[in-house]
Amino acid sequence: MDAIRIQGGVPLNGTIVIGGAKNAALPLMAAGLLTSEPLTLTNMPELADIATMGNLLRQLGVRIDQSALEAGADSAEAGATGRTMTLRTEKVASVTAPYDLVRRMRASVLVLGPLVARHGEAKVSLPGGCAIGTRPVDLHLKALEALGAKIELKQGYVHATVPKRLKGAQIIFPKVTVGGTENILMAASLAEGETIIENAAREPEIGNLADCLNAMGANITGMGSGTLHIKGVERLHAARVPVIPDRIETGTYAIAAAITRGSLTLKGTRYDLLKSVFDSMVQAGVEITQQGDSIIVSAKNGLKGVDIMTEPYPGFPTDMQAQWMALMSTADGASMITETIFENRFMHVPELTRFGADVNVHGTSAIVRGKGNHLSGAPVMATDLRASVSLVLAGLAASGETLVNRVYHLDRGYERLEQKLEACGARIERVGGG
Ligand code: UD1
């Protein structure tokens, strides 16, 4: 199993190109199931999760063609990205998303809505638990039922069927769910009549999906407002759609600049996607400037502790909570970090304390007593995607050597992480682990 070895304490300086968003690309790929015509996605990242979704879609009958880097991209530039993927589903060949794939990647559940809408049937394994909580899909299922699907749970699988066509309905999500909103957006696009989704997720990835569906001929309005109106159409058609920049990759490298007290230019991204995180960084004393499609992040010693609470968009993203904790453990002063989205998302705390971080968890909050730039390297273990990267960040700031084990989590969501960091001065390498 691979590990990442870091000799920390080097301020990072340079430019990092941000890739397309994993969490936008996955539902866009699932949307390829909704039409027999080709759906072309540009600015696609190259990640393990994208490959997993590709494997699942191929099993369902989707033909996938991928190009290398787009013309014009300078592959010599650190982190140049932007592949093109074309998905074509002439016929749905299978309606089953098997346990093995869904267990590895929860986002596999996003094929449920498109399959039922286009083919009238889907069998999707229940995802089960994961490192950060139980994460049920009950809200996806209730909403699909409201659209007229019959849902049965058998042998660990959700079997959803609809005799003819789904029918538009009013859906009120009792809790904001990103995946649930995406599944219903896709299903309702092909339903008969109008669907209204209340308390819809407002994440930028939802906007990207709605724009894609509209480009395919759907009729969706209300993006970003929390109430989505979808007038169902009989069929969708070909489209070409760019994947938005990855806001979590952007935020992670912004924290890499801050935690090493360096300066990074993050290229090919958007400030508005991550305003809550940038606002908190500025409050902590990090300097942030925008220049066209670049964001420049610089920091010096003497950062202040800043409290944050994770919330649905536009609040502070839960996917940036672990990275924020790493940064706060190098601030001068205390900060309180409250997790409201997932019930068990402090798995990184015991690992961060191995660097000398002073963190105490009380229920859904953690108190971080920052003591300046004092971390020292340690062998640590990655537990999930964002937790792993917080350990890399701590390792970049810490004096001495850090070995992050079980880094396969990182490959799910960060493209060429070591290369991007190394090009900015980090002493980081991948080694074969035990
Ligand atoms: C997506 C993101 C993930 C991010 C999360 C929250 C993708 C591929 N993943 O995950 O990176 O951390 O949003 O921003 O886009 N819930 C239920 N019942 C349901 C569905 C959700 O109780 O049917 C709960 C979840 O357990 C969780 C909360 O609602 O506590 C939010 O989950 P949700 O927004 O659905 O997250 P995902 O779409 O799985």
Image (spheres, rainbow, N blue to C red):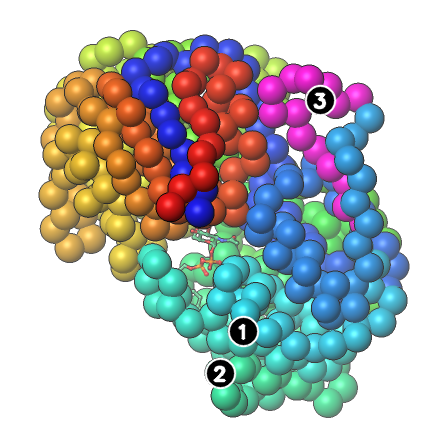
Please state which amino acid type lies under the numbered disc 1: Tyr
The vertical placement of 374 against 30, above or below, is above
Label 2 near label 3: C-beta < 8 Å?
Answer: no
Q: Image quadrant of ligand 1?
A: bottom left
For disc 3, the neighbor class at 10 Å (few under 14, some 14 to 19, many from 20) is few
Q: What residue is shown at x 61% (from left), y 25% (from top)?
A: 79
For disc 2, the neighbor class at 10 Å (few under 14, some 14 to 19, many from 20) is some
Q: Which residues are magenta?
A: 72-86
The percent position of residue 270, horizontal first and vertical second, equals 56, 28
The percent position of residue 351, horizontal first and vertical second, equals 23, 42
Question: What residue is pinned by disc 1?
Answer: 99
Is residue 195 in view?
no
Query: At numbered mark 2, what does the secondary structure look like: helix, strand or loop?
Result: loop
Image disc number at residue 381? none
Q: What residue is shown at x 54% (from left), y 73% (from top)?
A: 99
Q: Front-most of 354 and 125?
A: 354
Please state which amino acid type lies under the numbered disc 2: Gly
Query: Sequence-wise, which precedes: disc 3 or disc 1?
Result: 3
Asked if residue 326 lies left or right of residue 187, the reply is: left
Question: What residue is pinned by disc 3?
Answer: 75
Please state which amino acid type lies under the numbered disc 3: Ser
Query: Sequence-wise, which precedes: disc 3 or disc 2?
Result: 3
Most prominent secondary structure in the magenta stretch?
Answer: loop
In the rendered image, residue 22 lying in the magenta stretch gets the answer no
Asked if residue 407 lies left or right of residue 295, the reply is: left
Question: What residue is pinned by disc 2?
Answer: 156
Label 3 near ligand 1 (CB < 8 Å): no
The quadrant in which residue 75 appears is: top right
Query: At numbered mark 3, what does the secondary structure look like: helix, strand or loop?
Result: loop
Q: Front-most of 151 and 407?
A: 407
